[in-house]
Amino acid sequence: MVSYLAGVTSSALSFIFIVFAIGTIGYLVGGIKIKGIELGTAGVLLVALLYGILIHYVPSFAIAEKTITLYSSGIKGNFGIVSNIGTALFVTAVGLIAGPKFFRSFNRKTLSYILLGVIIIALGALTACLFVFFDKNLTADMAVGLLTGGLTSTPGLSAAKEVAKDEAQVTAGYGIAYIFGVLGVVLFVQLVPKILKVDMKDEVAHFHAANSITVPEPKGKLVKLDPFGFFPFFFAVALGCIIGSITIPGINFKLGNSGGTLIGGLIVGHFAHLGPVDCRIKKDTLNFFRELGLVLFLIGAGVPGGVNFVENVKVSYFIYGAAMTLVPMIVGYIIARYVFKLSILNNLGSITGGMTSTPALGTLIATAGTDEVSSAYAATYPFALVSVVLAAKIIIMIL
């Protein structure tokens, strides 16, 4: 009897069980609506964060397979693997969805997306510098950690740690600001259309009309290697990882797996074939990969984030981190609306890209009811990614 109970306990606390239990409860929480607002898939993040907090106070919940490893030198351990795989699945799917129209839709509006990506990060960096200037107890390392957490940018975190005087402070700041960094943008893309009383169906219709682009069919006879499109998807991920590993000399910058897989997805989605091999993938398959990737990313990043939050949180630091999320997001939205004259969907799509917020894009797609908003995200994200990596290094080096 004792051995039986021990076996049940071991099974219940296994890593695989924990991952899927968080996903199960997270979807239940995300489906709760309050005045039309729901967390959706971000409910998974909330449950993952709570689990991280729980195992901080009750370590026995994490005894099986050493399920939690903190950010001692980047995201490590089992949850880090889950997060990285989730990011690759989600971002590649976004690239493949946007790819057929992305390069064919380059126009003056594309410049707006590029500028927004840079402006949003610059606003966040300026906010961080101001807090360091006014709070003498706030170090540059902690400020940059809060900035990268507020922007949910793991590449920015890694870049900051390369030049930081105290890596632990960068990591702690990231954990403190990360929670609001995710939930803040997720709620923002839901609240803005409601506050402005946007007719979403009408906006989507106008959006499709304004972004109507004809995608030519590939020439010649193509061979489809599998019915689900696994070959082109895996090829896009592999290609993206190679692209992401390329380091630019001088500034020691690389896109990493997140930026690389986005580019890989855009390239494969654009050309739609590899020689005689058909690389087109059904939209339902891409939607599945995108949602699965998002859930895995939220679980993998949320649990360590919850532990770090409890260990390092200070009220003042939490406020600073929230400001580093809110200021660039709100000001960026205003600039996109009144200066660049972007429609609400292109505006919010570019904001999710500029804030490098994977979960917020998933929420925006669900809110808008169309995955076409991915194009604005895809156009803004790479430039925001480059900007946050450079900003993280510059702030630490000059302050």
Image (cartoon, grey):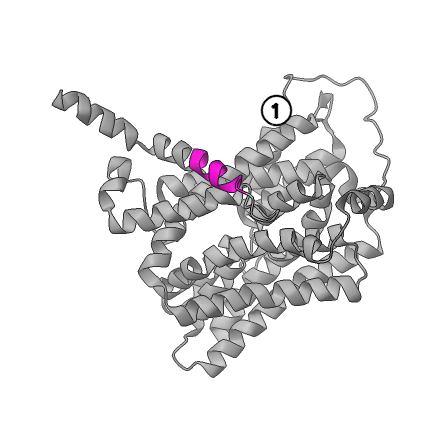
Of the pair 215 and 290, the residue shown nearer to us: 290
Could you tell me which residue is drawn at 61 percent across and 43 percent down? 362
Of the pair 262 and 370, the residue shown nearer to us: 370
> Which residues fall within the magenta stretch?
23-32
Of the pair 283 and 238, the residue shown nearer to us: 283
- The residue identified by callout 1 is 231
| Horizontal side of residue 58 vs 140, given as left or right | left
| Horizontal side of residue 35 vs 63, given as left or right | right
**Placement of 386 over or under 269, stated as above or below:** below
| Horizontal side of residue 115 vs 47, given as left or right | right
Residue 374 seen in the figure? yes
The part of the image, by quadrant, that contains residue 168 is: bottom left
Quarter of the image for the N terminus: give it.
top left
The 10 Å Cα crowd at callout 1, few under 14, some 14 to 19, many 20 or more, is: some
Query: Which secondary structure lies at badge 1?
Result: helix
Q: Position of residue 274 (x, y in %)?
A: 71, 27
The part of the image, by quadrant, that contains residue 109 is: bottom right
Q: Position of residue 216 (x, y in %)?
A: 85, 31
Could you tell me which residue is drawn at 62 percent across and 34 percent down? 236
Q: Position of residue 326 (x, y in %)?
A: 58, 65
**Residue 381 on the magenta segment:** no
Residue lying farthest to the front in this orientation = 35
Magenta span main SS: helix
Tell how many labels: 1
Could you tell me which residue is drawn at 35 percent across and 42 percent down? 77
Residue lying farthest to the left in this orientation = 2
Residue 85 seen in the figure? no
Q: Identify the amino acid type marked 1.
A: Phe
Could you tell me which residue is drawn at 63 percent across and 32 percent down? 287
Q: Position of residue 178 (x, y in %)?
A: 47, 57
The part of the image, by quadrant, that contains residue 281 is: top right
